[in-house]
Image (cartoon, rainbow, N blue to C red):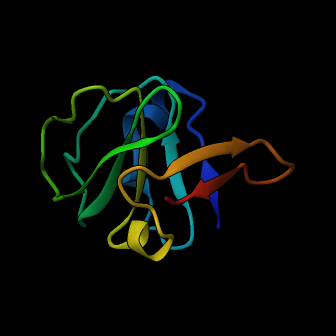
Amino acid sequence: MQLPLIIPQTRQELENGLLVYNSPKDWGMLFFNVSAIHTKGMKYTIDVVCLDKDGSVLYIAEVSPGVPYFTYPGTEHILEMGLKESQRYNIFLGSRLTVQLAPGFPIANIISP
């Protein structure tokens, strides 16, 4: 299964994350080399997928608006998605995401166990 991605490029995009979007559907935002996120100022709950250095899923959480700091031990990268989107894209503990940089949207290839 493939998931279109937005990969933040600027400091402002990193700080805002999904804050400037309506609840995303059919895509996710992937943060490389980020081990924690916040949901301050958000208006909706999101799925947060914590990945290790190889892109394997360590933990999946539904994070409510207003959380000042969320992390999970061993996290190297974080994928933010709309609520329940991780289930819809068959992302589970042990799944692995590889990123394909293609014209237009980058794509995450999801390999589920």
Relative to 8, is 106 above or below? below
The answer to which quarter of the image holds residue 83 is bottom left
Relative to 47, is 77 above or below? above
Q: Position of residue 46 (x, y in %)?
A: 30, 61
Q: Residue at x 64, y 43 (%)?
A: 98
Q: Position of residue 81 (x, y in %)?
A: 42, 60
Q: Position of residue 1 (x, y in %)?
A: 65, 67
The answer to which quarter of the image holds residue 57 is top left
Q: Residue at x 23, y 47 (%)?
A: 39
Q: Is residue 28 left or right of residue 45?
A: right
Q: Nearer the viewer, residue 72 or 82?
A: 72
The answer to which quarter of the image holds residue 16 is top left
Q: Residue furthest front?
A: 113
Q: Is residue 75 left or right of residue 27?
A: left
Q: Residue furthest bottom?
A: 88
Q: Residue at x 56, y 28 (%)?
A: 10
Label tally: 0
Q: Nearer the viewer, residue 73 or 16?
A: 73
Q: Nearer the viewer, residue 86 or 103?
A: 86
